[in-house]
Image (spheres, helix red, strand yellow):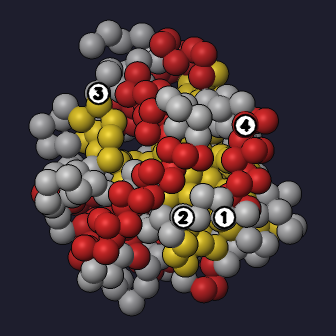
């Protein structure tokens, strides 16, 4: 594996009042200059990587139009009601005790996802290729399910309506939930995530990251909530934070497993649309498995 990233030369330390978040930002055309950067997220030297113009903004606008009219007719599942948000596809955190129907829906979801993008430009092709290149060529793919031929949903599309938000949490809190029982046998306990901005809100809807970490070994969850209630007890006003500015077509790979984060309330009538996948390296370290 060739190292081409000098972390401290090319990154910015951001956050206020105290800078804490080490961020690398570059254009998608320059991906080949950062071939080991996702490894730096795993080893803690980087917190986030913004890749600009993974898709062009006009194409993202056309995808937004189709998502707005629910075309293709993805399975639609809700966030908890107060979040004023929904998924196209099925978020693994909210999977109840019916894995059979989850995996049945996953096949249809992947077909519809491919139909939303031109051939070879889809999330499972172009976006996964970009991530693979940023990770020394490791294969990025949907996590395999418990039975032959089954796959977890590679991502979900998330719509956040006016007033919608996601409360503060660390993604590592998710891994102790029953829905992760099988996945935990395949992957490392440190997950991170990728967010592709498809359609931004008029205002608000910012991903904001806080200077507070929960290590994988410290993860626990309050089962009365789907939102990381432990993290919800933390006084955010006492923490430094950084808002991540994403434009349609940009993606961020972020250490959302360790770092506390939330999505600020959407302001204005325009729905915020993103595709969001969680990921972790397989236990043999040769692949990175993704799920929505
Ligand atoms: Fe998260």
Q: Camera-side residue: 39 or 16?
A: 39
Tell me what residue is drawn at x 37 percent, y 61 percent.
106
- Which label sits in the foreground, 1 or 4? 1
Give the number of callouts: 4
Q: Helix, strand, or loop for circle 2?
A: loop
Task: Give the residue displayed 60% in from the left and 22% down from the top.
Answer: 28
Whichever of labels 3 and 1 marks the residue nearer the N terminus, that label is: 1
Locate residue 112, reporting x and y percent. Answer: 51, 53
**In the shown orientation, is residue 153 left or right of residue 114?**
left
Q: For the residues carrying marks 3 and 2, which lies nearer the camera in this image?
A: 2
Label 3 sits on residue: 138
User: Could you tell me which quadrant the N terminus lies in?
Assistant: top left
Q: Position of residue 85 (x, y in %)?
A: 63, 73
What residue does disc 1 label?
A: 70
Say which element carries label 4. Answer: helix
Residue located at (67% from left, 78% from top): 84
Residue under numbered circle 2 = 74
Q: Which residue is mark 4?
A: 59
Residue 86 versus residue 69 in the image, above or below: below
């Amino acid at each position: 594996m060739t190292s081409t990233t000098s972390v401290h030369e090319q990154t910015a330390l951001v956050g206020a009042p105290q800078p804490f978040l080490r961020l690398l930002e570059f254009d998608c055309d320059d991906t080949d200059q950062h071939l080991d950067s996702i490894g730096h997220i795993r080893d803690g030297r980087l917190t986030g990587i913004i890749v600009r113009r993974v898709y062009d903004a006009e194409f993202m606008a056309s995808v937004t139009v189709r998502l707005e009219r629910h075309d293709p007719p993805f399975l639609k599942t809700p966030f908890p009601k107060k979040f004023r948000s929904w998924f196209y596809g099925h978020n693994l955190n909210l999977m109840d005790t019916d894995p059979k129907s989850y995996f049945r829906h996953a096949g249809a979801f992947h077909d519809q996802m491919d139909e939303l993008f031109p051939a070879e430009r889809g999330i499972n092709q172009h976006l996964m290729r970009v991530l693979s290149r940023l990770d020394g060529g490791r294969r990025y793919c949907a996590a395999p399910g418990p039975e032959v031929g089954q796959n977890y949903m590679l991502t979900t599309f998330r719509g956040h309506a006016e007033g919608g938000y996601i409360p503060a949490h660390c993604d590592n809190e998710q891994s102790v939930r029953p829905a992760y029982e099988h996945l935990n046998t395949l992957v490392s306990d440190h997950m991170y995530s990728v967010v592709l901005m498809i359609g931004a809100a008029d205002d608000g809807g910012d991903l904001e990251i806080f200077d507070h970490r929960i290590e994988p070994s410290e993860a626990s969850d309050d089962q009365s909530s789907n939102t990381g209630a432990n993290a919800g007890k933390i006084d955010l006003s006492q923490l430094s934070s950084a808002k991540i500015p994403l434009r349609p077509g940009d993606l961020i790979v972020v250490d959302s497993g360790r770092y506390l984060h939330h999505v600020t309330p959407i302001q204005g009538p325009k729905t915020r649309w993103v595709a969001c996948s969680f990921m972790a390296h397989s236990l043999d370290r040769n692949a990175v498995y993704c799920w929505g």
